[in-house]
Amino acid sequence: MGKVKFISGDDAFAEGIRLARPQVVSAYPITPQTIVVERLSDMVEDQSLKSEFIHVESEHSALSCAIGASSVGARAFTATSSQGLLYMAEGLPYAAGGRFPIVMMNANRATALPWNIYGDQRDSVSQLDCGWIQVYVEDAQESLDMALMSYYIAEHPSVRVPVMVNLDGFVLTHTYEAVDIPEAKLADEFLPPYVSDNKMDLENPKNMAFSVGPADNQEFHLLHHKAMLRVADVVNEADTRFQSIFGRSHGGMVEGYRTEDAEYVLITVGSITGLAREVVDELRSQGVRAGVLKLRFLRPFPSQQIAEALVNSIEQGSAEVGSVVQAVGTLEKDISFGYEGTIYTNVNSALIKEDVHVPSYNFIGGLGGRDISKEDIRKCFSHMIGKEKDKIVWIGLGVEDDVR
């Protein structure tokens, strides 16, 4: 146990970055991320963080600066949100393809138009194919812990891929909670200094960020893809190591709640998970076998872990047999216009890939920061229990029939 402070999700993430000791912080403000880089600038000023703090002229420059720092072997950090992430989009595959283990915090926020500063997840979900590891956190404590764990994962010799850590805008970034801030010596024990040979070096010169034609280009992407497939094992390793040092675990790629014998499971991402757990507890008290499965990572996508969580063991007499849940729903703050929620597409692909045959529903809500209530989540479970015909459901529209 370290020092407990009552701080926001943004503050908590900044504390985690301080403990990770990045050598370069490239900063450009954008609501609701700004607090993170403001706090880091304070830490550099008071020398609690020894780092080069570079205030650049745009989000594009912030990522470009981080790429440059990582390319000479420095541990680098930057942060953004919404339109800022989209402005960075050109640089995202550069960082990933260069195998530069940058950590970036993204404060999830709606993208324009209409202009909106409140939180949904359409900004980061739109960048799932850019080659970054993507993780979504639930609360301020997980925010701080993932700041440390993300560097462990990104810099692991078998991975070396950048990580984007996503915090729900305002709901998490600006909400205050009690957070345990570990001692620096324990953080140092968990996360060793960054050492890499993937860097510009006058003593050992190499060609980096070069052009590759059709004869070899695909092989580079295959190597990147294989590194992503190794992430799940490294996440489990990081979580086990973190628990042994700090006494906390966040469950690896996914985290189930009352899923062991659940008949109806709601898949969630980010801060809405806590409210979904409360609804599950209420339904359980009414005899409904409900459960929640939190997706912590969207890239790499945890297909196998989802399948394992949805296939339960139940006792029938003295024998145990495999049983699949009756229905699964994906609740997300995203829409791929003209089709369905992107996370739902990924979940359905995982179910097919893992040979899990179960009715699947998509619940779309929270766009532009609209509140998702307990009643909305109850309706999601009622829709699954009733085996309703409509598979794509917009929740919280303010009308009785939300399905269109």
Image (cartoon, rainbow, N blue to C red):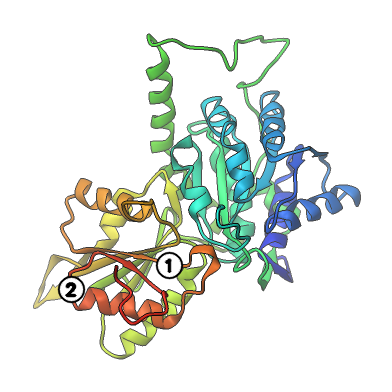
Q: Is residue 167 left or right of residue 328?
A: right
Rendered residue at 10%/75% (across/down): 318
Where residue 206 sits, quadrant-wise, is top right
Is residue 144 placed above or below 196 in the rendered structure? below
Tell me whether the residue at label 2 lies in contact with that at label 1, contact meaning CB atoms closer than 8 angstroms.
no
For residue 167, say whether it is visible.
yes
What residue occupies the far bottom of the structure in this picture?
Answer: 286
For residue 260, say whether it is visible.
no
Is residue 219 placed above or below 117 in the rendered structure? above
Q: Residues within 10 Å of mark 1 (few under 14, many from 20)?
A: many
- Residue 152 placement (x, y as % from top left): 58, 43
* Label 1 SS: loop
Q: Is residue 183 left or right of residue 310?
A: right
Image quadrant where one finds the C terminus: bottom left
What residue occupies the far right of the structure in this picture?
Answer: 46
- Residue 249 placement (x, y as % from top left): 51, 61
What residue occupies the far front of the structure in this picture?
Answer: 114
* Label 2 SS: loop
Where residue 108 sits, quadrant-wise, is bottom right
Where residue 397 sits, quadrant-wise, is bottom left
Is residue 143 placed above or below 190 in the rendered structure? below
Amino acid bearing label 1: Gly
Rendered residue at 69%/35% (across/down): 75
- Residue 85 placement (x, y as % from top left): 60, 44
Is residue 286 placed above or below 54 in the rendered structure? below
Task: Name the N-terminal-most of marks 2 and 1.
Answer: 1
Disc 1 marks which residue?
Answer: 365
Q: Which mark is residue 387?
A: 2
Observer-nearest of 103 and 250 = 103
Q: CA distance from mark 2 to mark 1?
A: 20 Å
Image quadrant where one finds the N terminus: bottom right
Observer-nearest of 174 and 403 = 403
